[in-house]
Image: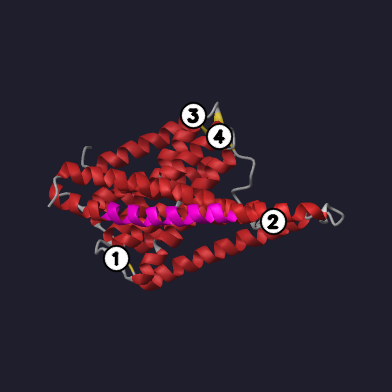
Amino acid sequence: MASPLLLLLVFVLSLIALVKASDFFTDAAEKIGLTLGLPPFIVGVTIVSMGTSLPELLSSLFGIFQGAPEVVVSNVVGSNIANICLVIGTAAIISARCLRISYDLVSVDLPLFMGSALLFTLMAWDQSFSRGEALLLFIGYIMYLFYILKGSDEASGESLTPSDSDGNESAQPSVDSFRATQLSRQGLILLLSGIFIFLGAKYTIESLIQLSEVLNIGKEVIAVSAVALGTSLPELIVTISAASKGKAEIAIGNVLGSNIFNVFVVIGIPGLIQALPVPEAVIIPGLPTLVAASLMTFFIAQDKKVTIWEGWMFILFYVWFVGSVFELF
């Protein structure tokens, strides 16, 4: 058995590789989608939102394949709490005065966000996710995607303009050549980043299992804290960048979309492979904290803004949660 210091180093490096490779993967997939002519909205709500949650999904799948299924639920609970408390809290604090939202979140996004958290809590309370429950969650995400794609079709239909038929035909070969070069380059990046995502997820979970044995700490405790925080870094970086540029819709929407994806897909897909246990350490304090943070978001976002002081409240929630997991409080 390797030393704790070496295992910790492997854990940190593999987690960094997983998160960074996911960033390259998402960026390349987004550029391929745009090069192929997909509407930017479609690319955003599918490729980008799924890409930022790719580390959670891959680390959860490797948890299943390497005999540590308890990390799946722990990872999702910890990541969703980090997304709400740490990501929204930080974004609100660094904003000039407050995060102002003009997009109508109340109609569908906020209720589905809150509903996914409540449904997840009800399913997890008996300390197990069955295959039937996982199937229901996966169907829920398909319904969510159907709603988004339907709305985007209506929006894109209104903005379509006739193509320029009398354009310069001599320029067409150079355009096609540029597109082919772009697709080849981004396809290679996609392949290489996919390999690093695979290796990063594999060694993250392997080192987590060995660390928990050496330090005599439950795998679920490391998953709900360190792994969850690491896999939430893409959401944190994207949200901070959006908030600093005054794009509150992206900041809040990224968190809502990622949490919905985590519940419906990151639990749904591994849960279809095998039933998922819910560790005692996740039920208390994880589930109550998740519900409380989701309720806070639901009510705070009703007036379409998140103030700096509300941001600090989210941060306090996260500090208390991490302290409770490690029994510091």
Quarter where residue 234 is shown: top left
- Secondary structure under the numbered disc 3 in the rendered image: helix
To which residue does mark 3 refer? Answer: 94
Task: Find the residue positioned furthest to the right.
Answer: 166
Residues 172 and 295: in front is 172
Sooner in the amino-acid sequence: mark 2 or mark 4:
4
To which residue does mark 1 refer? Answer: 65
Q: In the picture provided, is 328 more to the left or to the right than 31?
A: left
- Secondary structure under the numbered disc 2 in the rendered image: helix
Q: Which residue is drawn at 51% across and 40% down?
A: 300
Sooner in the amino-acid sequence: mark 1 or mark 3:
1
Instruction: Specify the amino acid type for callout 4.
Output: Leu
Q: Do the residues labelled 2 and 3 touch (CB within 8 Å)?
A: no
Q: In the picture provided, is 179 more to the left or to the right than 67?
A: right
Does the magenta segment cover residue 240? no
Front tag of 2 and 4? 2
Does the magenta segment cover residue 201? yes
State the CA–CA distance, disc 2 to disc 3: 43 Å
Sooner in the amino-acid sequence: mark 1 or mark 2:
1
Q: Provide the major secondary structure of the magenta segment.
A: helix
Instruction: Specify the amino acid type for callout 3.
Output: Ile
To which residue does mark 4 refer? Answer: 99
Q: Residue at x 42, y 49 (%)?
A: 21
Sooner in the amino-acid sequence: mark 2 or mark 3:
3
Q: In the picture provided, is 137 more to the left or to the right than 32?
A: left
